Image (cartoon, helix red, strand yellow):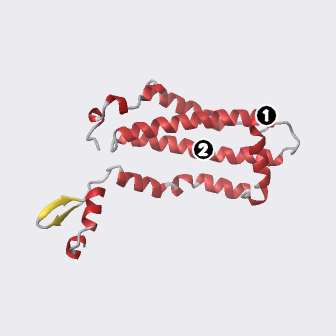
């Protein structure tokens, strides 16, 4: 394990500029995706809906990848964590839009022409139609996405070191309780140490 990115050999580092040239470019792409999700219209030919949604999904994936990698490079950086949260929020908006797209698929003529690469997806949506949530329930879950993701965010904050690790006394020595130290201490044969 390396203490900082500077300690990692150059051959094992990734180059974020291959995804976005700068954070400003990433933010502009986020703004654009957010606007495109809000303006997305499912009331048009199904092939167009699917093609455009596929494009939005690819852009979303690229934004989340950049935010995740950037946050992983420097854990505990509030700005990077905030960017990751923004990317997750945009992804939640895309998932809500996916529900609208799938409603459009279920409402379309089953024999309507769609580009070949979407045929399996459309068939799958029709097969799952009996198990789909009512639109109101789906919208409610979409609105609660941020709340439902809270446990994941809390866990990430703990793992990423957003909180100061407690210290424990082990054989008269004060030890910071990191994940690796916790595992080592739990393997101690002395029950008093484990407690």
Instruction: Report the side of 130 relative to 28 (left or right).
Output: right
Quadrant of the rendering where the C terminus is positioned:
bottom left
Q: Residue furthest bottom?
A: 191
Q: Looking at the image, how many numbered discs can be counted on the residues?
A: 2
Q: Residue furthest left?
A: 172
Q: CA distance from mark 2 to mark 1?
A: 25 Å
Mark 1 — residue?
115
Q: Residues within 10 Å of mark 1 (few under 14, many from 20)?
A: few
Res. 20 visible in picture: no
On the image, which quarter does residue 179 sit in? bottom left
Q: Residues within 10 Å of mark 2 (few under 14, many from 20)?
A: some
Instruction: Report the side of 127 relative to 69 (left or right).
Output: right
Which residue appears at 13% of the width and 67% of the height? 171
SS label for mark 1: loop
Res. 15 visible in picture: yes
Q: Nearer the viewer, mark 2 or mark 1?
A: 1
Instruction: Report the side of 8 relative to 65 (left or right).
Output: left
What is the x, y in percent for residue 41? 73, 36
Residue placed most toward the observer, 148 or 140: 148
Residue placed most toward the observer, 92 or 187: 187
Q: Which mark is residue 93?
A: 2
Placement of 184 over or under 78, stated as above or below: below
What is the x, y in percent for residue 127? 79, 54
Q: Which mark is residue 58?
A: none
């Amino acid at each position: 394990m390396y203490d900082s990115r500077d300690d990692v050999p150059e051959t094992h580092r990734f180059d974020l500029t291959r995804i976005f040239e700068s954070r400003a470019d990433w933010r502009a792409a986020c703004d654009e995706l957010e606007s495109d999700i809000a303006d997305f219209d499912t009331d048009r030919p199904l092939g167009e809906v699917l093609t455009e949604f596929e494009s939005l999904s690819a852009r979303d994936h690229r934004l989340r990848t950049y935010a995740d990698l950037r946050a992983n490079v420097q854990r505990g950086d509030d700005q990077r964590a905030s960017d990751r949260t923004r990317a997750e929020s945009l992804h939640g908006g895309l998932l809500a839009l996916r529900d609208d797209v799938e409603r459009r698929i279920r409402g379309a003529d089953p024999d309507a022409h769609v580009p070949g690469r979407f045929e399996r997806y459309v068939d799958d949506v029709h097969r799952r139609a009996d198990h789909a949530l009512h639109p109101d329930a789906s919208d409610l879950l979409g609105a609660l996405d941020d709340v439902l993701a809270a446990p994941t965010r809390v866990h990430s904050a703990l793992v990423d070191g957003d909180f100061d690790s407690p210290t424990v006394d082990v054989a008269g020595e004060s030890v910071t309780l990191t994940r690796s130290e916790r595992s080592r201490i739990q393997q101690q044969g002395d029950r008093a140490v484990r407690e």
